[in-house]
Image: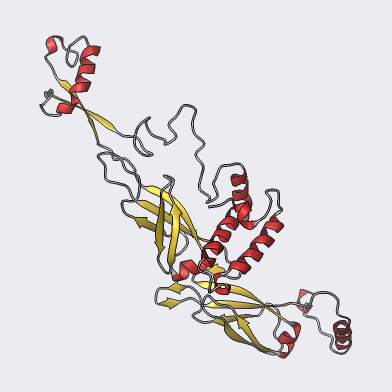
């Protein structure tokens, strides 16, 4: 993934407010619902969400700026002086340690555990030709074998998907720590924290079956919806005259937009339920809750102010009377 600052088009010294503003503008511009004829819109939208997840979060942004995590939010290995950057033995496979066991027995080359003769020769040279430390070469021999405890060859990676991808499913390209890239099928209805296991796509080591790839899914913040379990919540801006006179207002959902009837005299903060318009769940779907927010026109409006002054003088009321 590209540098998140580059994706959102902001400088590294940008304020949190500037990042939030840039994210909202880009998310609105590249939202898949607004770009039905652009097959790459979903990919750009996902990239924008992923970038915001890194530098839109104060802690993750600091980690990224310090070089502790990469553009996908994965930890960067800092390394040890003189050590193996893969975390294992020099020349060893993968990111684990091979285990070895010693066993005693009477075999030599060609006998039981014949491949252990090389180690026997080392022991013999250490003990002056004696086997097992006994004079005359009579005694128990040592065999050297690998095995015992298996190597962890599984790979763990994180993948961020958009809310639309989580609901409808799709395909996303994932880059592994090994540099390999895979197209991963996202099952419809995936939830945050769920793991997708790809058999045999982990690391490999001689003498061991390949590990698996474990992909932990997270869902990027959505510019419109807030996820509440299997339900969705959205703030719906309405005009002052819609609140007073009522009317029908189009409301976005994860599917197509629907019309919501606003009753007369609707206060800001009133919540309506759209049944079955939430996220998929066992036996059906959650609901979508729509909360009205009355928005006044920008700038001063002398006519509106005069109307309100006249109305106030003849219709006094106190919505805060219960405050005392």
Determine the residue positioned at 47% across, 56% down: 159
Q: Does residue 57 appear anywhere in the picture?
A: no
Q: Quadrant of residue 9?
A: bottom right
Q: What's the colour scheme?
A: secondary structure
Q: Quadrant of the C terminus?
A: bottom right
Q: Nearer the viewer, residue 141 or 116?
A: 116
Q: Nearer the viewer, residue 137 or 71?
A: 71
Rendered location of residue 54, percent (x, y):
58, 53
Determine the residue positioned at 52% across, 51% down: 72
Q: Does residue 240 appear anywhere in the picture?
A: yes
> With respect to residue 309, does 200 lie above or below?
above
Determine the residue positioned at 54% across, 81% down: 274
**Horizontal side, residue 299 vs residue 223: left or right:** right
**Horizontal side, residue 286 vs residue 199: left or right:** right
> With respect to residue 215, does 291 lie above or below?
below
**Horizontal side, residue 105 vs residue 69: left or right:** left
Rendered location of residue 190, percent (x, y):
43, 65
Rendered location of residue 246, percent (x, y):
69, 89
Rendered location of residue 257, percent (x, y):
56, 81
Q: Nearer the viewer, residue 170 or 239?
A: 170
Determine the residue positioned at 39% across, 58% down: 196
Q: Quadrant of residue 53?
A: bottom right
């Amino acid at each position: 993934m590209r540098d998140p600052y580059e994706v959102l088009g902001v400088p590294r010294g940008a304020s949190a407010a500037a990042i939030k503003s840039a994210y909202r503008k880009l998310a609105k511009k590249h939202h898949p619902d607004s770009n039905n004829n652009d097959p790459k819109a979903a990919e750009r939208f996902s990239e924008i969400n992923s970038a915001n997840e890194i530098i839109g979060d104060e802690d993750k942004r600091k980690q990224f700026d310090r070089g502790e995590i990469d553009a996908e939010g994965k930890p960067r290995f800092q390394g040890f002086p003189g050590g193996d950057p893969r975390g294992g033995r020099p020349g060893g496979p993968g990111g684990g340690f091979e285990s070895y066991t010693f066993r005693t027995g009477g075999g030599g080359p060609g006998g039981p555990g014949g491949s252990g003769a090389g180690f026997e020769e080392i022991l013999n040279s250490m003990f002056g030709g004696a086997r097992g430390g006994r004079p005359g070469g009579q005694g128990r021999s040592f065999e050297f074998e690998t095995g015992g405890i298996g190597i962890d060859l599984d790979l763990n990676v994180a993948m961020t998907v958009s809310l639309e991808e989580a609901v409808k499913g799709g395909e996303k390209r994932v880059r592994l720590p090994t540099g390999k890239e895979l197209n991963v099928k996202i099952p419809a209805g995936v939830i945050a924290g769920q793991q997708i296991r790809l058999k045999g796509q982990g690391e490999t080591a001689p003498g061991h079956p390949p590990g698996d790839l474990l992909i932990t899914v997270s869902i990027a913040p959505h510019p419109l919806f807030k996820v509440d379990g299997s339900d969705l919540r959205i703030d719906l801006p309405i005009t002052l005259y819609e609140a007073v006179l009522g009317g029908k207002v189009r409301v976005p959902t994860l599917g197509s937009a629907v019309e919501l009837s606003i009753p007369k005299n609707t206060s800001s903060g009133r919540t309506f339920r759209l049944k079955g318009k939430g996220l998929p769940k066992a036996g059906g779907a959650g609901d979508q809750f729509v909360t009205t927010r009355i928005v006044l026109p920008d700038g001063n409006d002398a006519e509106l102010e005069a109307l309100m002054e006249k109305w106030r003088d003849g219709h006094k009321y106190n919505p805060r009377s219960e405050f005392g």
